[in-house]
Amino acid sequence: WNGMTYTSSNNTALDTLTNAVGCDSIVTLNLTITNSTSGTETVTACDSYTWNGMTYTSSNNTALDTLTNAVGCDSIVTLNLTITNSTSGTETVTACDSYTWNGMTYTSSNNTALDTLTNAVGCDSVVTLNLTITNSTSSKDTIVACDSVTWVNGITFTQSADTVITITNAAGCDSVVTLVLTINSVSDITTTVSGDTITANNSNATYNWIDCKNSNAALNGETAQSFVATENGNYAVEVTEAGCVDTSECVELTTVEVIENTFGSAFNVYPNPTHGKFTVDLGSEFDNVTVVITDLNGKVISSEVYENSKTIGIELDAPAGVYMLNIASESNNTIMRIIKQH
């Protein structure tokens, strides 16, 4: 004022001027100095912030604005801005049968469920649920087995039973499996021997007689409960009952073909079994040899007398079956079985 700069209020400054009538005019300056102000606006915002018409998407502490303060002076404001960010993510879940998320239970696969949370910097965190629902299963395993069976749980069963176990299916869920098990077995594999006849004691089965000395080869056509041996050997029966198969012990028969023989050890009949033609070898020559063939009931099939004979060729003209061969000379006799095959 009048060449003097004041920075504080003052009401003592004087100046002498000349008024309109040419006299001194003393002017006192009543001065009030007010002050400009400055400040910082500290803001934390998510993703963006608009300040004085300007939108900021990143942190900033250099933005300025000049306002008028309460006393009418400039007020310079610096914006100290921190921009934090919202986040998004996916929660991937595989569950069996159902899954509860944020209070909602889902029973089928879903990748559209959303939830908004607050992340570590205080902004929205949008989470998408990527849900796969797999399912538990149940099944029944019906098994009919002979004697024993080892099931999927590693347990060996020897008796019929119903059992339930829970295992993990291919989808990783529970698989409840019910075993309905029937265990069968051959109830009796014993035999009874009477002469040249072996009988299976099990009457509720089917039978297959085998030759133990011939690698357990099946005896052709021998499928009855009883087996009549036509030659010495070692025999057993393969018994089938309720779908199960078991074999009896082998039985040794040593006196099948020849019932009686006084012609000596050289005596032989071959082949036996025969398809009809066979030879009798007496071992030495005999006079007046009578050869009689009968069926098992004693009915005579043929009867011939041979003179001065050592070997005799015979043809049995009869159906397949077992027949009795009676050979007699003046001093010797043989009785034996002959088997006629088809």
Image (tube, rainbow, N blue to C red):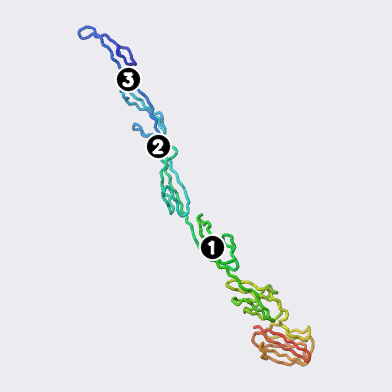
Q: Which of marks 1 and 3 is in front?
A: 1
Question: As rendered, which of 200 and 159 lies closer to the eye?
Answer: 159
Q: Which amino acid does label 1 sit on?
A: Thr
Q: What residue type is labelled 3?
A: Thr
What is the quadrant of residue 160 in the picture? bottom right
Q: Name the residue under label 1.
A: 163
Q: Quadrant of the C terminus?
A: bottom right
What is the quadrant of residue 285 in the picture? bottom right
For marks 1 and 3, the one nearer the N-term is 3
Q: Which of marks 1 and 2 is in front?
A: 1
Q: Name the residue under label 3.
A: 34
Report the residue at 38% width, 34% height from top.
56
Q: In which quarter of the image is the N terminus?
A: top left
Secondary element at image label 2: strand
Q: In this view, does 340 lie above or below 236?
A: below
Question: Where is residue 3 shown, x and y percent of the image?
Answer: 31, 12
How many other residues sit within 10 Å of disc 1, few (<14), some (14-19) or many (≥20)? few
